[in-house]
Amino acid sequence: MGDLHMGVEAEAINDSSSDNHSKRVDIYPLSCYYFGSKEAIVLKDETLSDRINRMKSNYAAYGLRTSVEAVILVELFKHPHLLLLQVRNSFFKLPGGRLRPGESDIDGLNRKLSRKLSASEDGNETEWQVGECLGMWWRHDFETLMYPYLPSKAKKPKECTKLFLVRLPESQKFIVPKNLKLLAVPLRQVHENHKTYGPIISGVPQLLSKFTINIVDI
């Protein structure tokens, strides 16, 4: 019985150590990464009314719209920075996009990251380390804002956006379409800055609060 008790204790300690390791995020200096450009991608130029009509049409055809976005961190000036895409020198977004019908979250995020951040869209050059889902945001009607919860009265939500932690290796190439900018923004600047970054991005620092961010010196 004593041996069994010791075995259970050892297993519990190992599980705790493994859990603590999974809650640690190693981030590497921005200088470890190469940044280049590739051909521009087509961006939709539409009004708010056009977007709402498109969402209604897609919902009628495919149902709930699901998007997946990546939370990617690097180190700069001894502080964690979040990688964001800037579109038309105006608004910011996390790398990612909408899933295809029947596509899994992981496959869809890999496809979107390869399309927007890799030299080739087939993903052969980059293996993205997609981790756990950090949070989910919901749009319960076509004309409403997105919220980090689904109201009980919302029986048929129209859109869901899932945020995933994506860990970077020590070195990697980022090849970005010419009509997009990839920026490293300090987490402290993003925190609760709804006006500049919107509610989803400005809420990322809170989602990361359960992790230990380990800055790796190279």
Image (cartoon, rainbow, N blue to C red):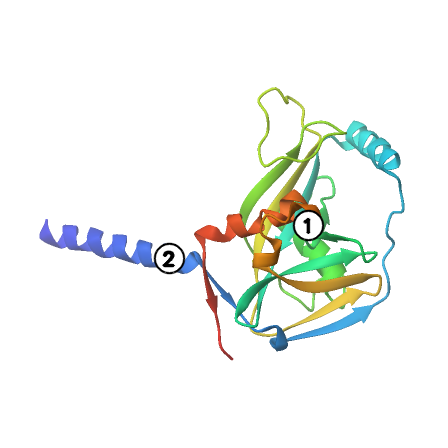
Q: At which x and y percent is residue 5?
A: 15, 50
The answer, for residue 107, to whether it is visible in the render is no
Name the foreground residue: 85 vs 34: 85
Q: Which of the marked residues, 1 or 2, is nearer the chain's N terminus?
A: 2
Q: At which x and y percent is residue 141?
A: 72, 27
Going 76% across and 73% down the picture, which residue do you hit?
36
- 147 lies above or below 215: above
Going 74% across and 43% down the picture, which residue do you hit?
100
Q: At which x and y percent is residue 112?
A: 72, 54
Q: Residue furthest bottom?
A: 218
Instruction: Determine which residue is flagged by label 2.
Output: 20
The answer, for residue 170, to whether it is visible in the render is yes
Q: At which x and y percent is residue 210?
A: 44, 51
- 201 lies above or below 144: below
Name the foreground residue: 92 vs 194: 194
Q: Amino acid at mark 2?
A: Asn
Going 76% across and 32% down the picture, which residue do you hit?
62
Name the foreground residue: 160 vs 48: 48
How packed mark 1 is, by other alpha carbons closer than 10 Å (few <14, some 14-19, many 20 or more), is some
Instruction: Determine which residue is flagged by label 1.
Output: 197
- 90 lies above or below 184: above
Q: Residue furthest left?
A: 2
CA–CA distance in space, label 1 to label 2: 31 Å
Name the foreground residue: 23 vs 93: 93
- 3 lies above or below 66: below
